[in-house]
Image (cartoon, rainbow, N blue to C red):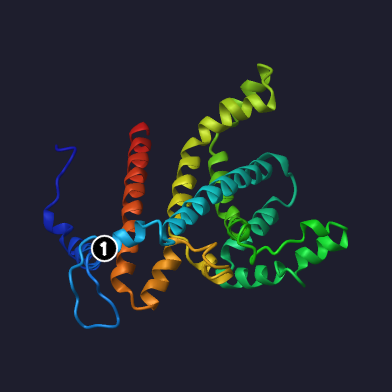
Amino acid sequence: MKSHRSYPFYFVLAALVLYVTFFIIPSLSGIAYSFTDWSGYSDEVEFVGLDNYRTILSPDENYLSFIGNTLVFTFWTIIIKTVFGLALALLLNQGVRWFVNGYRVLIYLPVILPTLVVALIFRSMLDPASGLINTFLRGIGLDGLALSWLTDPRIALYSVIGVDSWKGIGYIMVILLAGLQTIPKDLYEAASIDGASAWAKFRFITLPMLMPALMIVTVLNVLYGLRVFDIVYALTNGGPGYATEVLSTEIFKAFSKGQFGLGTAISSILFLILVVTGYLVIRVMERQSDRE
């Protein structure tokens, strides 16, 4: 009896045709158009080589800062969401005894709120003149901390990062909480008998056992951060100036202006970054499967 039976190729043919038609061909067409001057102002499409990429990588343009903003956004949202999500997961897993499910719902609630609603609420709260946060800070005598959260180019991107992290921490917490609940209690009991401190239990039991879940949330945060669009567009629309502009918002604006060739070139760069990241995701998942 064969343990590994091979199935006919035509079993996957329909799915393969759909995948090639709706993903591979449009992706390759987009890359091909990135080498042209395709625009909404002319019916002619001319091959321009690497001109669009030279424009994007030119220090005289702002596109490199958009890439930088995207990477800064991705880096800090990963750190903030993972650290606070892990802290809340640990608290709900061990530190809270009553109303645990209620706390889980409250912490997860921002995840299910529409991004536009979250953005409108925080735009009101972060208003420099009449916003709730600045009003509160002035009320307790901390006038110096009442800032122009979304209109000061120096802090606007970090304000967006803070809002996005607030919205996404609950999602990360749920994944890490599920990972924590798979760790056998016997390990902690054995460590307690050996006199291990709380930090030693966290360092040598919790973190190693939670590493697969941490890898998953890191990969999810990387993919989300690199493609972020809605929260940036709804909060600041890339402003003030270009202070919070990221790759996805610039792609949208390029297409809105009829600069299709340039837009596809920016999309191709983002596509390349995502492919590399996706490859790393597959490698991580394969290693995890091999261990199991």
**Image quadrant where one finds the C terminus:** top left
Residue 94, relative to residue 147: is it above or below? above
Q: Is residue 43 left or right of residue 244?
A: left
- Residue 139: x percent and y percent? 87, 63
Q: Nearer the viewer, residue 21 or 64?
A: 64
- Residue 93: x percent and y percent? 65, 42
Residue reaching furthest to the top = 194
- Dot 1 corresponds to which residue? 51
Mark 1 nearby-residue class (10 Å; few <14, some 14–19, many ≥20): some
Looking at the rendered structure, the kind of residue marked 1 is: Asp
Is label 1 in a helix, a strand or a loop?
A: helix
Residue 53, relative to residue 38: is it above or below? above
Q: Nearer the viewer, residue 179 or 33?
A: 33
- Residue 77: x percent and y percent? 55, 51
When asked about the image quadrant of residue 2, the answer is top left
When asked about the image quadrant of residue 127, the answer is bottom right
Mark yes or no: residue 114 visible.
no
Residue 99, relative to residue 20: is it above or below? above
Residue 170, relative to residue 285: is it above or below? below
Residue at horizontal 55%, vertical 49%?
76
